[in-house]
Structure formats: C-alpha cells, structure tokens
Amino acid sequence: MAIKIGILTSFDNTYEKYARACRELKVDHEVVDVLVPEWVENVKKSHCTGFLARPSSDFEVRKSIFDERLYFINKVMDYPIYPSWEELYLYENKRAVSHWLEIHDFPRPRTRVFVRKKDALAYLKECDYPVVFKASTGSAAKLVNIVKSYRQAKGIVTKIFGRIHPVFSRGYNGYSFHGIPLPAGGANQRHYAIIQEYHQIKWEWRVIKIGDFFYGRKKLLRGEFASGSKRVGWEPPPEEVLRLANDICQTGNFLSMGVDVFETVDGRLLVNELQSITGARSGVKMLVGDKPGRFKLIDGKFVFEEGEFNQHDGYFARAKHFLEILRASGAGEE
C-alpha cells in the first residue's frame, strides 16, 4: 500500500499548513477530524500510514484532551505520529518541561511546581522577589507574571487554590484590559502553581531543530519579556547555544523541537522552554549575514547551508521529514 499521510484537525486552522505542504510534496493525504465523538472510527477508516499533528495551545483542557487522543493513536493503535508523542506531550506543558529539564540536569531557572496551597505559601514567605508565575499552557508570555511582593503572590495563590477549600477555587488568568481584570474563566489556572526564579536577561535565543537541521535567532526584549515581543535579532546563535540545543534533542531523541534559551546579563545560558511546534511567520528562520539558511551538524561541526527552508511556517519541513521517516521504515513498499 502506498504511503498516505493523515493530518489531524486542530481547534484552529493551522492543520491546513500541513495539507498545503503535503500537496506540494505530492503525497497522498487526508484531513482526519479527531475532535468529533467518532474520532476513533475516523482514524481507522482513513487507512493512513501515519499522522501529522498540531495540538491546541490555548486552553489546558483542550491540550489534555488532544494529548489523550494522540496517546491512543500512537501508543495503543500503533500509528506513527509526527512530532513524536513525547515531543507533543511536552508542547505547551510547562509543568512537564520543568520536570524533564530537572531530571536531565540541564541549566535552567529553578522552577517549582506546587500542588498544595500550604506549600506554595510557605515558599513564598521565604523566597527572594521578584518571582515568575506561569501557567502550564500559553504562548507569547501569556499567563506569565513577574510578581514582586508576597502580598501579590498570596493573592494569586488564593485564587488558584481557593480561599477555604479547592472546590471554591476561582482560578487565575492574569488577563486584563488597561489594568481592568477580564472574566476569562475559560482560561483560568486552577489547583497548581508554577513559580520560577527570576533572572535578568539580555535576550532569549530560540533554536529550532527539524530532522537533521538547526535554525536559530535572537528574541529581543520588549519590557521585561522576550517571548511574544515580536522583536527579532537575526544573527545566528553562538555555537554554545547550538550545542546545548543539540544535547537536549539527543537526550530526548527529539525530531522536531524548539529550545528557548535565556542569556542572562551575567552571561549564563538557562533553558527556559521546549516547544515541539514553533511559529515563524516570515519566510526566514535564520540569517547568517544577509543570507537565509540553516545549519547541519556534520562531523561535529555546524555547517551552514544557504536557502529558504521555512515554507508554511516550518510545516513543510516537518511534513517532509515525516515522509522521509516513513519511507525509511519501508512504509509504502509492496
């Protein structure tokens, strides 16, 4: 049977970028709706060789539901998916990323995940301020707050865990309009707190690995945040940053991964986040001088290859790599 790639629907239209990539690759493909109650039937009757996936990154419950369905598609029904289930599980899951980085002892801002109110308050009474509160999901610095006092921190913790009992948790989302809190209940964070040590940074490096290739650029600050600033420094990451990203990807056997690395004002490199799906709306992910391109690690050296490789925001490169993996596995051979 010839290779047929399935493209899993998402809560937005980003999956259409995979469809465009498959058309350009001239590979048989089908969009498979996994958001309906009949999603298992849809997967089975598609007769696809494997599936390209892009989970939701807006609400935790949606992300959790998508993770469940990917688990059954990959681990129970035994279909290949791309990126891998492990990579997609870490995507927009800051709780899990903090544990992964700690287990593997990569340099990072110290991050604590609290699931009991009393433990969070005990820490906040003794810690140095400012500290950084994060929700598990949310891109572009959404739901990330630099908190400068115990009083402010206690207020957030009380909303997260409830004043008297967890059943009374109002949740916390941090959304506001001109300083006025918005009742965005669907985005509320409840029953856990992620509290990270604050580090003053010069900028943040983003390194993206897709297959054997690396792309990178600098995210400049807007205010106190680099994430979501939309300010880009186009010089390529230094080799030390590239090697750190490569070490992470080798450790996790990651095929498609974005590694965000803080460079602090005192010159340290700290891994902030891992994202298996990253956006890059321009046609370029990296410039060396004025030349677009990418790096490939050859005989221990990062070798530059000139060209534009960011068709459809990187979805083309992911689809192409998945197709190469399926062909290498013998899929599609009679």
Image: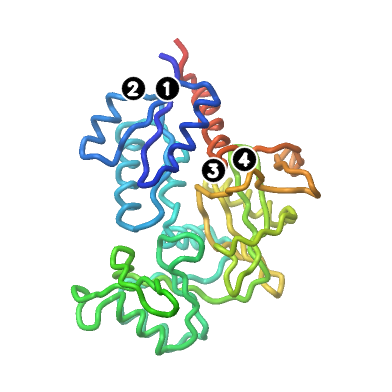
Q: CA distance from mark 4 to mark 3?
A: 14 Å
Mark 2 and mark 1 residues within 8 Å of each other at the beta carbon: yes
Which is more N-terminal, label 3 or label 4?
3
Q: Residue at x 34, y 79 (%)?
A: 157
Q: Residues within 10 Å of mark 4 (few under 14, many from 20)?
A: many
**Is there a contact, CB below 8 Å, between mark 4 and mark 2?**
no
Find the distance from the CA under tag 1 to the CA under tag 3: 21 Å
Q: CA distance from mark 4 to mark 1?
A: 23 Å
Badge 2: residue crowd in 10 Å (few <14, some 14–19, many ≥20):
some
Q: Amino acid at mark 1?
A: Lys
Q: Position of residue 138 (x, y in %)?
A: 43, 61
Amino acid carrying label 4: it is Asn
The residue that mark 4 highlights is: 310
Marks 1 and 3 in Cβ contact (< 8 Å): no
Mark 2 sits on what residue? 47
Q: Amino acid at mark 2?
A: His
Label 1 sits on residue: 4
Going from N to C along the chain, the mark reached first, 4 or 1, is 1
Is residue 101 positioned above or below 122 on the image?
Answer: above
Q: Earlier in the sequence, mark 1 or mark 3?
A: 1
